[in-house]
């Protein structure tokens, strides 16, 4: 009779996510993950061809955790204000994971930005007061919000500033109202 698999792929993904939350990517090796969770490296290499594949799958798992769970938390009635506030709060609660995702992970390949834009477009589609915006205007609003939210996340994580809910609501409300005043202005992109 074959032995039952004790450590599943889902468990390995959760271990990887927990590791990123605690330590980031700087020492993300099979040996370090295994040591942290008291397992051997064998389950990792039996599920994944190599460490690159495991890292990629853990990043996808972290991506899901961030966008589909944490960024769906409600901080304001307006979803275009709530979404960036949730982003700042996510970065504060998960500084190593934020760093892993945005500095060492997907961000440099624009994957995070593109996924964030897709999520943002879904939010706009659900908010009656923004449905008149053109696709280009939504893209511009998302880009302006992206720049502001990442600056605020970095400032908060590095303890330069702490932003309370009222201030975040005000700032992101300003980003929206300024964009609505001149919806076609956007920074140059490569």
Image (cartoon, rainbow, N blue to C red):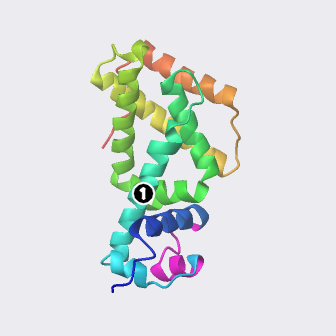
Q: Residues within 10 Å of mark 1 (few under 14, many from 20)?
A: some
**In-image side of 143 versus 164 (left or right):** left
**Residue at image location 70% in from the left, 42% down from the top:** 161
Q: Is residue 165 magenta?
A: no
Tally the numbered discs: 1
**In-image side of 117 versus 18 (left or right):** left
The vertical placement of 28 against 186, above or below, is below
The secondary structure type at the circle numbered 1 is helix
Q: Quadrant of residue 143?
A: top left
Q: Position of residue 37 (x, y in %)?
A: 57, 76
**Residue at image location 50% in from the left, 62% down from the top:** 17
Which quadrant: the N terminus?
Answer: bottom left
Q: Position of residue 185 (x, y in %)?
A: 37, 23
**Residue at image location 49% in from the left, 25% down from the top:** 79
Q: Is residue 130 visible?
A: yes
Q: Nearer the viewer, residue 141 or 126?
A: 126
Q: Is residue 186 visible?
A: no
Q: Nearer the viewer, residue 50 or 176?
A: 50
Q: Position of residue 6 (x, y in %)?
A: 45, 76
**Residue at image location 41% in from the left, 31% down from the top:** 142
**In-image side of 6 versus 114 (left or right):** right
Magenta residues, start to end: 23-36
Q: Which residue carries the number 1 mark?
A: 61
């Amino acid at each position: 009779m074959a032995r039952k698999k004790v450590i599943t792929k889902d468990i390995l993904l959760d271990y990887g996510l927990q590791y990123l939350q605690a330590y980031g990517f700087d020492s993300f090796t099979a040996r370090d993950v295994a040591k942290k969770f008291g397992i051997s490296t064998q389950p990792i290499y039996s599920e994944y061809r190599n460490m690159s594949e495991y890292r990629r799958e853990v990043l996808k798992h972290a991506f899901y955790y961030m966008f589909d769970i944490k960024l769906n938390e409600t901080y304001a009635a307006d979803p275009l204000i709530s979404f960036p506030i949730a982003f700042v709060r996510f970065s504060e609660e998960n500084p190593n994971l934020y760093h892993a995702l945005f500095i060492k992970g997907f961000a440099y390949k624009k994957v995070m930005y593109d996924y964030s834009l897709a999520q943002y477009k879904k939010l706009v589609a659900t908010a009656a007061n923004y449905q008149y915006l053109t696709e280009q205007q939504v893209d511009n609003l998302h880009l302006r919000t992206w720049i502001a939210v990442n600056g605020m996340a970095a400032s908060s994580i590095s303890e330069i500033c702490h932003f309370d809910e009222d201030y975040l609501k005000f700032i992101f409300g300003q980003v929206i109202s300024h964009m609505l005043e001149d919806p076609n202005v956007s920074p140059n992109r490569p």
